[in-house]
Image: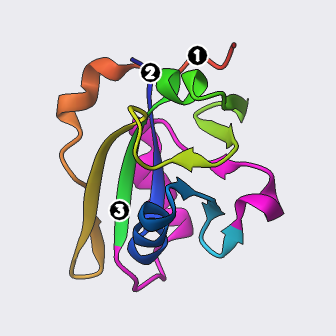
Amino acid sequence: MALIAHVAIVDDWDSARNLGEYVVSTRGVSLDEAGFVHAVRLDGVRGVLDEFYSDIRFGLLLIVLDADALRADGLEITEETPGFPHIHGAIPTDGAAIVAELPIERDGGEFVLPDLSRFAGGGAPSTSA
């Protein structure tokens, strides 16, 4: 199982759950606009949060995804920049690709990452089909 993650705004993810697919690339950008959904390797989550979400006050979730299951659902995953996979297509919200939905908390303005140690064996995804 090759694990990657996506940072989602809680309201966006909740809406997607109702529709059956997630079509947000990143905060304020749709899949249609970007052409892909941004993802990150698990070891890069802190950097993404600090660089792109430090000013956000909405609730956030870390969606842990099985890249192999996404491919089995017919989605292509590319990685033009090492550590930052792109998921080309809508993410099914009710399939095997969703490994975990973990709240991202704040303490005094700093992000408190969920414990990702249980996913340590997930490794980096292969970007080949």
User: What percent of the width, then of the height, locates residue 71?
Assistant: 59, 24
Binning the other alpha carbons within 10 Å of mark 3 as few (below 14), some (14 to 19) or many (20 upward) gives: many
Q: Which residues are magenta?
A: 30-59
Tag 1 secondary structure: loop
Q: Write down the residue under mark 2.
A: 2
Q: Write down the residue under mark 3.
A: 61
Q: Would you say residue 112 is visible in this rendering?
A: no
Closer to the chain start, of discs 2 and 3, is: 2
Closer to the chain start, of discs 2 and 1, is: 2
Q: Amino acid at mark 2?
A: Ala
Left or right: where does residue 23 sit relative to residue 42?
A: right
Left or right: where does residue 122 sit relative to residue 48?
A: left
Q: Is residue 62 above or below residue 111?
A: above
Q: Amino acid at mark 1?
A: Ser
Q: Tell me the CA gap for discs 2 and 1.
A: 7 Å
Residue 70 vs residue 106, the one in the foreground: 70
Residue 126 vs residue 109, the one in the foreground: 126
Residue 28 vs residue 71, the one in the foreground: 71
Disc on res. 126: 1
Binning the other alpha carbons within 10 Å of mark 2 as few (below 14), some (14 to 19) or many (20 upward) gives: some
Quarter of the picture containing the C terminus is top right
Q: Tell me the CA gap for discs 2 and 3.
A: 19 Å
* Residue at (55% x, 57% y) in the render: 22
Are the two marked residues, 1 and 3, in contact with CB atoms closer than 8 angstroms?
A: no
Q: Quadrant location of residue 5?
A: top left
Tag 3 secondary structure: strand
* Residue at (28% x, 18% y) in the render: 121
Q: Would you say residue 105 is visible in this rendering?
A: yes
